Amino acid sequence: VQLQAYGGGLVQAGGSLRLSCAASGRTFSNYIMGWFRQAPGKEREFVAVISKRGGTTYVADSVTGRFTISRDNAKNTVYLRMNSLKPEDTAVYYCAADQGSGGYVYTSRLNHYSYWGQGTQVTVSS
């Protein structure tokens, strides 16, 4: 499956952005979808995940209450709504897909994801 993330940009602290990730090439609903981010000089970290049909979501503690993940399987797209953005949210955001062959409903483990988008930059100014 090919993934393309977009929607990043420059926003002031307290602002909002919605990232989108469009998938093509395979049946989108067969994949668990996740968002990760990587700030300069730091390792890539988990942000949010959604199960194949969208019934289960899980977000990192650092973004709980501010970020929401959703998906539209009819549009082959997963979204990350980011509210109350902070300067520490500045990073390149990546979407990723996992077939979930291990039997789990969702996963936050980076090495479970086989397919990655190219990333979209989010910069939050103070």
Image (tube, rainbow, N blue to C red):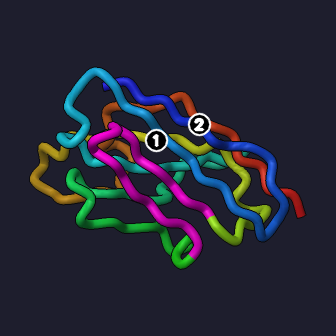
Name the residue: 54% across, 67% down. Answer: 67
Q: Which residue is mark 2?
A: 6
Q: Which residue is mark 1?
A: 95
Disc 2, SS: strand
As drawn, which residue projects farthest toward the right?
126
Picture quadrant of residue 126: bottom right
**Helix, strand or loop: magenta stretch:** strand
| Residue 77 on the magenta span | yes
Q: Is residue 14 left or right of residue 107?
A: right
Along the line of sight, which residue is nearer the eye, 11 or 93? 11
Q: Is residue 68 left or right of residue 54?
A: right
In percent of width and height, residue 13 lies at: 81, 66
Is residue 41 visible from the viewing direction of this image? no
Disc 1, SS: strand
Along the line of sight, which residue is nearer the eye, 120 or 104? 120
Check the image and report above or below for 27 versus 108. Answer: above
Q: Circle 2: is it few (<14), some (14-19), or many (20+) Cα within 10 Å?
A: many
Q: Is residue 81 left or right of residue 40?
A: left
**Which kind of residue does numbered mark 1 sit on?**
Cys
Along the line of sight, which residue is nearer the eye, 122 or 100? 122
In percent of width and height, residue 69 lies at: 44, 60
Is residue 101 visible from the viewing direction of this image? yes
In percent of width and height, residue 55 lies at: 23, 65
Magenta extent: 66-82
Say which label, 2 or 1, has the lower sequence index: 2
Check the image and report above or below for 108 versus 112. Answer: below
**Which kind of residue does numbered mark 2 sit on?**
Tyr
Q: Is residue 17 left or right of residue 13?
A: left
In percent of width and height, residue 101 lies at: 12, 43
